[in-house]
Image (cartoon, coloured by chain):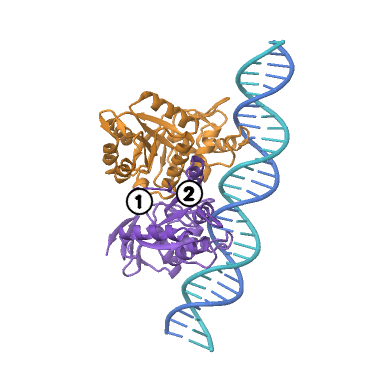
Chain colours: A orange, B purple, C blue, D cyan
Amino acid sequence: MAIPRILVVDDDAEIRSMLAQFLRENGFIVLPATSLADVQRHMNTERIDLILLDVMLGDENGVDICQHLRQDHDVPIIFISALSADHHRMRGYSVGADDYIAKPFNPQLLLARIKAVLQRAQRTSSLTYRRRVRSFAFEGWQYDGKHDQLTSPKGYTVSLSQKETGLLKVFLANPRIPLTREEIASALDVTGDASVPDSLGRSIDVLVGRLRTKIELDPKSPDLIKTQRGTGYVFATDVTVSDG
Amino acid sequence: MAIPRILVVDDDAEIRSMLAQFLRENGFIVLPATSLADVQRHMNTERIDLILLDVMLGDENGVDICQHLRQDHDVPIIFISALSADHHRMRGYSVGADDYIAKPFNPQLLLARIKAVLQRAQRTSSLTYRRRVRSFAFEGWQYDGKHDQLTSPKGYTVSLSQKETGLLKVFLANPRIPLTREEIASALDVTGDASVPDSLGRSIDVLVGRLRTKIELDPKSPDLIKTQRGTGYVFATDVTVSDG
DNA sequence: AGGGGAACGTAACAGTCTGTAACAAAACCC
DNA sequence: GGGTTTTGTTACAGACTGTTACGTTCCCCT
């Protein structure tokens, strides 16, 4: 599974920025939004794993946004609000929120809650979520997420192991974005304490090497998965995503 | 949907009784429990839709109970506790709780939270096979639950043994959801103590292999029942359900 | 320009996981 | 009772995966 992508919906730029930085430092990809139109644009064009939604949004009302979203989406939604009275909370839950956190809040508690909600969503994936299975195209290759099948530019099927498939998915979900070994390991749920810099050993490097032998014309001089010395790896090509 | 059945776990008889009465007045079936053994007895003998779990349980610790339950069960769990400090909450979430409500609490807020959690659980698939007789279609195959008959894409009837049929039903009820061997065994009521990690042996693997020989074009390279190494198996195709 | 150290590539190895053939016991059917 | 089918267990082989060790490449400093 790819790095979780969190949509932070708040019209206050300072709060949005602080939340984004905090979440990025904790391993998430963060996308900002300030309005329902913003939210819907993101939901329609890319994968969103969780939404942090401020109740008070200037001219717009977070509760209305949540209600609107729930008509079409099952994405987890956590309300953040200065309004902590019980009846506000109940209103939030009644429109389909997964949690409601009152400002000011302990950032570590927010983090725990986000992880719990994401873990649950992952554990109990719904049919709706599974319909988001995608197909990816890059440099003549096709990865069919529905059938878990990789086809080469010449048309033959390439067999990948589970970890190799997972790594490819991480790259396909993050084209042209440099990924550290820790980020990749976190996305793959690889053994190792991510907070200890050397705990990963060389396993990610070996795995990258194994995937390269299967998809690069010349693995010794890779064109698709490039090394960024001192950082990690980058999928150095454009990826086209389509549904089905 | 049937009336939700809530298990109230609290060693304080007065609190248990008040909660039970309140929930019954709001339309739920309430079952009391005071210990892990109580909880497990209920979980093993009847359907439980949600658990309200007190953190302080006399000699037992609600967190330990939650942790234990999460090994085998996906039932929603809401902690109730006088301990409301953030680190207590985080501990609760980290062991798999769905929410954490501090005493003293507004009963209406608890009710809203219960309803939200139940609604969410209802939106997702369950391991429990739906008792209603249904027909399922996948990749040209048809399974007629009424007549217990499986028809291949080419139109001929495929004979399955009882266990094979049960396994297929579990997959059809949970398309695209990874299922552990323990989950499958539990759904099939297979011999073996699910709380003992190694008790299953390889029987589920063999059963999966047998079903594969009957429904896969190439059992050595299966398209329908895919292996998730380290986890279990997933029915990797969309399933269309219809009544009758 | 040269040297040293860090980062990365990769072969080899060992442990884990899974597929499956073979077997035996139980269940089922005639 | 006998034959067949079902089911779980056992054993083995192959694939997968991470670790280790060594060689190569890169970068920085003198």
Which residue is outermost to the front? B14
Residue B49's spot in the image, x, y percent? 39, 58
Residue B118's spot in the image, x, y percent? 35, 53
In the image, are marks 1 and 2 on the same chain?
yes
For disc 2, the marked residue is: B96
Indicate left or right for B230 with D28 as reference: left
Camera-nearest residue between A89 and B222: A89
For disc 1, the marked residue is: B107
Indicate left or right for A30 with A94 as reference: right
Number of numbered discs overlaid on the protein picture: 2
Work out whether residue B74 can be spotted.
no
Instruction: Classify the position of the C terminus of chain B by image quarter.
Output: bottom left
Camera-nearest residue between B45 and B198: B45
Q: Residue at x 54, y 57 (%)?
A: B58
Amino acid at pointer 2:
Gly
The crowd level at tag 2 (other Cα within 10 Å; few <14, some 14-19, many 20+) is many
> Residue under mark 2: which chain is it in?
B
Residue A225's spot in the image, x, y percent? 51, 31
Between the residue at mark 1 and the residue at mark 2, the CA separation in whole angstroms equals 23 Å
What secondary structure is marked by label 2? loop
What secondary structure is marked by label 1? helix
